[in-house]
Image (cartoon, grey):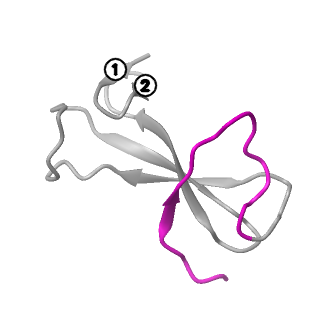
Amino acid sequence: MPVLREIEIYKIDEEFRVCPACGYDYGFHTSFLKVDASKKSPVRSTREVFKVILICPECGARYDVGWRVSFTGSEPGVVRTTGHQVSTV
């Protein structure tokens, strides 16, 4: 099992399928990391929000591409973020 690296923030242009760290080109696994509510944020919410982290199955590199989801409430929903605002879709 590869050693977990720091999570790298990555901006997707047209497609993000190939790992920039090792060149693996069959896509990514996903994991969910709870957003720390204690950190200062311009948005306060009672919802639990999670970062979607993409993980390279080959080298273990981890990427935060800005996706956020919420699993609270009656139905799971996608959370749209702009960096300053969060809204449920």
Q: Is residue 14 magenta?
A: yes
46 and 15: which is toward the camera: 15
Tell me which label, 1 or 2, sits earlier in the chain: 2
Residue bounds of the magenta highlight: 1-21
48 relative to 54 in the view: left or right: left
22 relative to 1 in the view: left or right: right
Residue holding disc 1: 87
Q: Callout 2: few (<14), some (14-19), or many (20+) C-alpha neighbours within 10 Å?
A: some
Dot 2: element: strand
Residue drawn where x is 54% and y is 77% of the image:
4
Residue 10 location (% of width, % of height): 56, 51
Real-space Cα separation, disc 1 to disc 2, in angstroms? 5 Å
Residue drawn where x is 24% and y is 53% of the image:
36
Residue 26 location (% of width, % of height): 85, 54
Quadrant of the snapshot with the C terminus = top left
Dot 1: element: strand
Residue holding disc 2: 80
The majority secondary structure of the magenta stretch comes to: loop
Q: Is residue 44 above or below residue 9?
A: above
Residue drawn where x is 63% and y is 40% of the image:
12
Q: Amino acid at mark 1?
A: Ser
Residue 75 location (% of width, % of height): 42, 22
Q: Is residue 25 above or below residue 13?
A: below
Quadrant of the snapshot with the N terminus = bottom right
Residue 48 location (% of width, % of height): 28, 39
Residue drawn where x is 75% and y is 38% of the image:
15
Tell me the quarter of the picture where residue 65 sits: top right
